[in-house]
Image: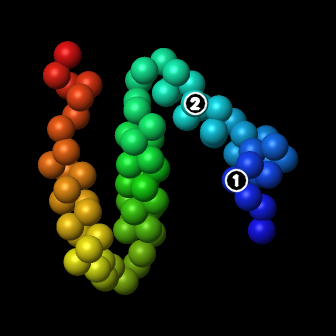
Amino acid sequence: MKTPRQKYENDPEYNRLVTLFESLIHEAKFTPSEIREAALLACINYEMQRSSRPYYMPKEALDALSYLEGFPDKRSRS
């Protein structure tokens, strides 16, 4: 299994994804924490949408989502 650095150096699509994230951070559009949160939420949304059976989510995951939904959006205050 390749490390993220190895994938970055050898996989052009993965490299573009990382470069996109970096450019969003450099442009001050998102913080590194927001990029991580967005990537996690995208994975959760994908898993929930593709599941044809009722999806069980552990209480800890539900608590984490509730926390993120209540987190203030810094961009909306400007």
Of the 4 image quadrants, the one containing the C terminus is: top left
Q: Residue at x 38, y 54 (%)?
A: 41
* In the image, residue 76 above or below residue 59: above
Residue type at numbered disc 1: Pro
Residue 57 to residue 31: above or below: below
Tag of residue 44? none
Crowdedness near tag 2: few (<14), some (14–19) or many (≥20) residues, C-alpha within 10 Å:
some
Provide the secondary structure element on which disc 2 rests.
helix
In the figure, residue 66 lies in which quadrant? bottom left
Q: Position of residue 11 (x, y in %)?
A: 80, 47
Residue 67 spot, x, y in % from top left? 20, 56
The residues tagged by marks 2 and 1 sit, at their Cα atoms, a distance apart of 14 Å
- Residue designated by label 2: 22
Label 1 sits on residue: 4
Report the side of 10 relative to 26 (left or right).
right
Q: Residue at x 26, y 63 (%)?
A: 64
